[in-house]
Every structure is written in C-alpha cells, then in structure tokens.
Image: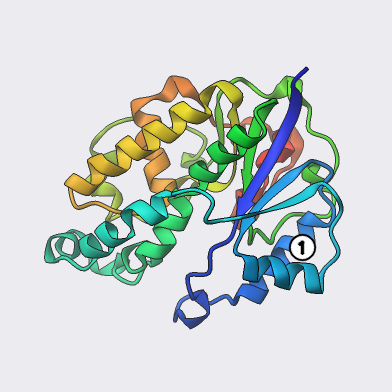
C-alpha cells in the first residue's frame, strides 16, 4: 500500500552571509527550518552537510519523522553545471542581454544560488529512489520562513484533492491584481531571452509537489531545459526555468492560484508564495 506524501528539503552553504543583497547566515536558515520541522506531521528527508547536521542536532530537538542524509550522496545540477553557469554569467554575451534594472538581481550575479535551486528536483528524485512507496513527493525550501502556525503542512493534506501532476503555485508576482490569475502562454514575453529582462515570477518554487509517476520525467525535462538554455547563454533561477518547462509541457502541470479559490482567503502578495498547501 502506498503512503501519501514524503517531504524533501536540502541546504547547501553558498556563503550568502557575505552578499550585499538579502544576506542570510547558515544559522538563519537553520532557525527558519526548525520553525516548521518541529511541527510537521509528515516524514521529511533533509539533505545537509555533516557540519550542518551536527549544528542542528546540537541546538534543536527533532522528532523521528525528520530524517537527515548527507547532501553530497548524489550528483546534482549544482555539481554538474556550476562552472559552466559561472562562465556564462561572467560572459559579455550574457551581460549584454541583461537590462540595467536587472543587473543587480541575484540570479544574474550568483550562479551558486541558481543551481542550488535547480537541484531541488535531484533531491526529490533521490528521495523517491530511497523511499519509492509514496504517492507524492513534496519539496519545501529549507529556509522558508513565512508559514503560518495553522499551515496545512502541520496538520492534514487531503490526498484526494491532489491531481496526478507536477503541482506549483501560480502567483504572477509584480503583475497588477486585475491582470492576475491567467496562466502564461508561449509568446514573445516568455521566450528564454525575454525572461532575462523581466522581474515577473509566474510560479513560486518554494513548495512544489510531484506525483510518483512524474518524478524521473520531471528531472529529465529539467536537465534538458537547462542544457537548451545554456546553449543560448541564458541562466536564471528555478522559477524562470519552471516557466519554460511548463510552456513546453502544460499537460503535466497543475497550477492553483489564490484568485481561483477566493473562499480560502489566501492573501495576495509575498505571503502567497508559501501557501500552496492551503489549497489542499
């Protein structure tokens, strides 16, 4: 008999405490993580270094449903493409495609940031190989920090409400409310090159779910898209890559939006990013 949902997260130290924009220390991340890890009712696989694991176990108390594994137990996109994306970001070709208003954006400066986010699906797939008897595999960011105390993450997710698809929350941040709620279509505003000039985020990558039958396929599609964009000298964060994969394969995705479920009273804005589970 298959179990319902397995949650997965990971943390890799990319020295974010030294950033000029939105710096965070490893200790900050660990505190954010413990806020939900101490309450979650579901099994949660946590891929971290031995150093971070030691810090967590020394400073916090965890229940048996929190399972720690070393984050170098698999080769991720971070391992495979960091040097290439660093080369692209530093190239004159890439820089010429970035407008002035986006030159200070994190994804155009830090390839480490992009690739730890791209590697989420690698950890999800690894978790499935280790624990293959779950209907859904759910990613949740290690440093997520806006979950409410009554989040469904802490209680009960109605598995019957989950379609057998790849599930992200559709948000369209930076778009006026009156224009939100419609999924993007493949046009000039969504070409790979155009995403480099846009601050618009269509899908929140902080939490996503993948049905058992689609985990491997999604990892394959993700890597295929990364390679395709590398050839164009285009790199960006996970939310922009998900957009490109969705445009090519919309039938594989389900994208709930707060506008479609007004009865849930899910707020619009930044807090909406972390509310995917509230739909279920």
Residue 229's image quarter? top left
Q: Is residue 82 above or below residue 151?
A: below
Residue holding disc 1: 34
Q: Tell me where residue 23 appears, x and y as whole percent.
A: 53, 77
For the image, the number of numbered tags is 1
Q: Secondary structure at mark 1?
A: helix
Residue 141 seen anywhere in this rendered image of the structure = no
Task: Name the side, left or right, on which 255 lies relative to 21.
Answer: right
Given residues 277 and 230, the one toward you in this image is 230
Q: Residue at x 51, y 47 (%)?
A: 120
Q: How is the image coloured?
A: rainbow
Quadrant where the C terminus sits is top right
Residue located 30% across and 49% down the image = 195
Image coordinates for residue 61, horizontal then vertical, percent: 86, 64
Crowd class of label 1 (few under 14; some 14 to 19; many from 20; radius 10 Å): many
Name the image quarter holding the N terminus.
top right
Q: Can you name the residue that lies furthest to the top here?
A: 1
Q: Is residue 72 left or right of residue 118?
A: right
Q: Quadrant of residue 10?
A: bottom right
Residue at position x 60%, y 26% from top? 211
Image coordinates for residue 72, horizontal then vertical, percent: 52, 56
**Above/below status of 150 relative to 87:** above
Q: Residue at x 53, y 47 (%)?
A: 205
* Whole-percent x, y for residue 58 in the image: 79, 73
Q: Would you say residue 261 is visible in this rendering?
A: yes
Relative to the observer, which residue lies in front, 226 or 75? 75
């Amino acid at each position: 008999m298959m179990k319902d949902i397995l949650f997965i997260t990971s943390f890799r130290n990319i020295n974010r405490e030294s950033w000029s924009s939105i710096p965070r220390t490893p200790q900050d991340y660990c505190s954010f993580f413990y806020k939900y890890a101490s309450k979650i009712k579901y099994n949660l696989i946590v891929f971290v270094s031995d150093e971070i694991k030691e810090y967590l176990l020394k400073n916090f108390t965890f229940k048996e449903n929190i399972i720690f594994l070393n984050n170098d137990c698999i080769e991720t996109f971070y391992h495979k493409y960091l040097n290439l994306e660093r080369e692209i970001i530093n190239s004159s070709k890439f820089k010429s495609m970035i407008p002035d208003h986006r030159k200070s954006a994190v994804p155009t400066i830090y390839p480490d940031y992009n690739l730890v986010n791209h590697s989420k699906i690698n950890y999800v797939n690894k978790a499935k190989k280790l624990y293959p008897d779950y209907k859904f595999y759910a990613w949740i960011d290690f440093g997520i920090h806006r979950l409410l105390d009554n989040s469904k993450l802490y209680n009960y997710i109605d598995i019957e409400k989950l379609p057998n698809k790849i599930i992200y929350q559709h948000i369209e941040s930076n778009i006026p409310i009156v224009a939100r709620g419609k999924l993007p279509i493949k046009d000039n505003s969504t070409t790979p090159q155009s995403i480099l000039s846009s601050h618009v985020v269509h899908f929140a990558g902080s939490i996503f779910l993948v049905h058992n039958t689609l985990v491997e396929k999604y990892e394959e599609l993700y890597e295929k898209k990364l390679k395709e964009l590398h050839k164009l000298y285009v790199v960006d964060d996970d939310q922009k890559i998900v957009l490109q994969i969705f445009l090519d394969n919309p039938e594989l995705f389900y994208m709930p939006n707060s506008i479609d479920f007004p009865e849930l009273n899910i707020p619009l804005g930044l807090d909406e990013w972390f509310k995917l589970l509230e739909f279920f």
